[in-house]
Image (cartoon, helix red, strand yellow):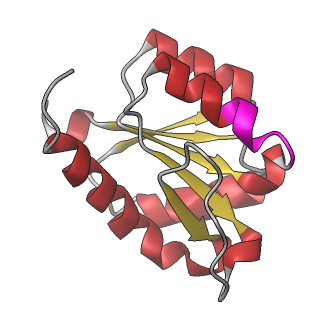
Amino acid sequence: MSRDRIRILCIACSASGLSTLEQTLKRLPYSVLTAATPDQGVAMCVAQFVAAVIVDAESVRGKEWPVVKSLKLVRPSLPIILLDERSGGRNLERPEGVDELVSVASLEKLPEAINQLLRSIARLPPP
C-alpha cells in the first residue's frame, strides 16, 4: 500500500480542534478522515482500512475506555493516539489500549508520533 493511500481517522474532534489537526497533518502524505462521534468512527474502521486513529480526549471524557475498546475489537493492532489537553508538561498514564498520548499544546509532536507508531506496526509479523 502506498503512503498516499494510508488513512488516519480523527474521531470526535471539535470544529476548532479538527481545523488545528488538519493544519498539523496536512504536511503528512496520508489521507485524513473524520468522524463526528465515536460510533461513527468505529463504523468507519469496520467499513474501510485505517492505519491509525486520533481520538480527542476532551470530546470523549469519561468514555475513553469504551471508545478505545470498540476500536481495538475491530482491529486489535490498530494504533490509537489520544489527544489530551491535560498532558502538557505532565506525565500522565495512558489509558488502557491507547498507544500514544499527545498533548493538544504539543501538536507539533503528532506527526512523529503517527510515523513512529506506523513504523512499529509495519515491523510486526502478520497475524
State the residue at coordinates (56%, 63%).
Answer: 101
Q: Is residue 81 left or right of residue 116?
A: right
| Image quarter of residue 94 | bottom right
The furthest residue to the right: 62
Q: Residue at 35% of width from left, 36% of height from top?
A: 51
Check residue 65 for magenta coloring: yes
Above/below status of 67 relative to 43: below
x, y percent for residue 67: 69, 32
Looking at the image, is 101 positioned above or below residue 46? below
Q: Residue at x 80, y 44 (%)?
A: 60
Q: Quadrant of residue 34?
A: top right
Q: Quadrant of the C terminus?
A: top left
What stretch of residues is rendered in magenta?
62-67
Residue 10 is situated, as x and y percent measured from the top left of the image, at 57, 43
Q: Position of residue 1 (x, y in %)?
A: 13, 30
Q: Is the stretch drawn in magenta largely helix, strand or loop?
A: helix
Q: Residue at x 74, y 54 (%)?
A: 57
